Image: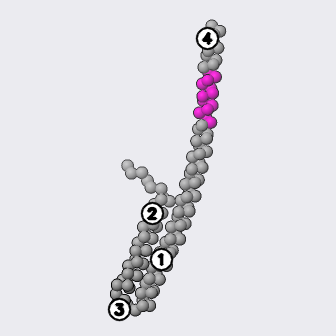
Amino acid sequence: QVPKMDPFVAKFQHLQKAFEASTLKCKKVYLDQLSSPSASHSESELFKKLQRELTNATLLLVELKSASRNSHFHFSECRQKAMARRKLMDSSHLKLQNFQYEKNHLLREIQTCE
């Protein structure tokens, strides 16, 4: 069975792929203009297309940064919870060891008295 991916990681990966695709579109529009400056498209059409792609890439970048912040916050909370539970487990384990030591001590005392 495949483990379920964390939703924060999944969203981040999705946004990252979308951002990369958008930046590739921007490069393609720019390179198309450089390779054929006398193409049938007017400069204003190409400018609008490039501006639209850059705007889309910028919005995706903002979402990507937000998703990154949210995932770091989420994982920081998880780390703190894990540390608190680890401290509780360590405390319980130490109590168990103390009880075992006390039990063994009392058993030795009983044996010496018999």
Label 3 neighbour load within 10 Å: few <14, some 14-19, many 20+: few
For mark 2, what is the residue?
13
Label 1 neighbour load within 10 Å: few <14, some 14-19, many 20+: some
For mark 4, what is the residue?
111
Instruction: Identify the element where label 4 is drawn.
Output: helix
Mark 1–mark 4 CB contact (< 8 Å): no
- x, y (%) of residue 97? 60, 28
Instruction: Identify the element where label 2 is drawn.
Output: helix
Label 2 neighbour load within 10 Å: few <14, some 14-19, many 20+: some
For mark 1, what is the residue?
56
For mark 3, what is the residue?
38
- x, y (%) of residue 74? 56, 56
Q: How far apart are marks 4 and 2 (CA)?
A: 66 Å
> Going by the picture, which residue comes out furthest to the top?
114
Mark 2–mark 3 CB contact (< 8 Å): no
Q: Give the range drawn in magenta.
A: 91-103
Mark 1–mark 2 CB contact (< 8 Å): no
- x, y (%) of residue 53? 45, 79
First along the sequence among labels 4 and 2: 2
Marks counted in the figure total 4
First along the sequence among labels 1 and 4: 1
